[in-house]
Image (spheres, rainbow, N blue to C red):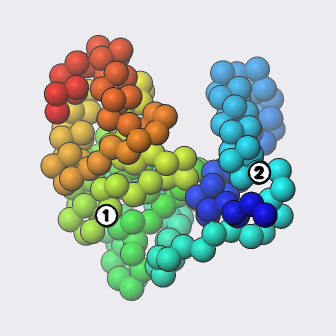
Amino acid sequence: ARIPPSKEMVTSLHSYRAQKQKLEDHNETSSERYHRVCYLLENAEAEVGADWDGVTVLEDKNDKQTVVMPDYIGRAVGTGDTKSVLRWINANRAEDRANAKSSADMTSVPALGVAAAGDQLALMTILLQLGADVDCRNSTGHTAISMMFASSELAKVGESDRIRLLLSWGASFFPGDGISREYCIRKARICGKPEHAIL
């Protein structure tokens, strides 16, 4: 008998299926993004295994339930609407809303990652001060720091400030395709940002 998949593996699987369906619904089956999602879905299905019953998952030892951000809060985080984000976080201090994540079909990106991708340095700082986990991962294993080394992020102005902030709060690199320190350094050099290799 095979070990059941983790919640993260199942979330990734569902996320890629939802992304693929969305692209198919918009008739974007010949796009590069569609082919990339199909590739990631194939890998996720292989990780989960063909014999998975569709229900059983490994239980987390973490007793805290992950808070899912409503879509309007995800947009507020990405656009830097600090007032709305803080109002939502403070509305229920019993929940760990500083570590809230987007929905599974949006790859469960932590609020800190959404703020980083949205170029919201001030909101990133606030989230970290409120207890956001600098190494919280999305369903594909990426952290805010690894997301900062995507080509689209490296093309933005001010990305080094966001990278420095995350590193100053102890952001870690993890082994793995697209998230290791070596990969991020190589990506920075390829994108013409060799100064990030020495941060």
Please give left or right for residue 32 compared with residue 179 in the image: right
* Amino acid residing under circle 2: Gly
Farthest front residue in view: 1
Numbered mark located on residue 132 in the image: 1
145 shown above or below 3: above
Q: In screen coordinates, is 169 left or right of 84?
A: left
Whole-percent x, y for residue 95 in the image: 42, 80
How busy is the neighbourhood of tag 1: few (under 14 within 10 Å), some, or many (20 plus)? many
- Judging from the image, what secondary structure is the residue with disc 2 in? loop
Q: Name the spot of residue 18 as percent of width and height, x first.
A: 73, 48
Give the residue furthest to the bottom: 94
Whether residue 117 is situated above or below residue 93 in the rendered picture: above
| Cα separation between marks 2 and 1 | 33 Å
Residue 185 appears in the picture as rendered: yes
Q: Nearer the viewer, residue 125 or 52?
A: 52
What x and y, as percent, mark residue 163? 24, 39
- Mark 2 / mark 1, whichever is N-terminal: 2
Q: How crowded is mark 2: few (under 14 residues within 10 Å), some or many (20 or more)?
A: some
| Element under disc 1 | loop
Residue 155 appears anywhere in the view: no
Label 1 sits on what residue type? Ala
Residue denoted by label 2: 49
Which residue shows up at 66% across the image and 21% down it?
A: 32
Q: Position of residue 55 (x, y in %)?
A: 78, 69
- The structure residue drawn at horizontal position 73% and vertical position 43%, both measured from the top left corner, is 46
Q: In this view, does 177 lie to the left or right of 165?
A: right
Q: Nearer the viewer, mark 2 or mark 1?
A: 2
> Could you tell me if the residues under marks 2 and 1 are in contact, i.e. CB atoms within 8 Å?
no
Count of marks overlaid on the render = 2
Residue at (72, 52) in percent of width and height = 48
Q: Which of 33 and 55 is in front in this view?
A: 55
The quadrant of the image that shows the C terminus is: top left
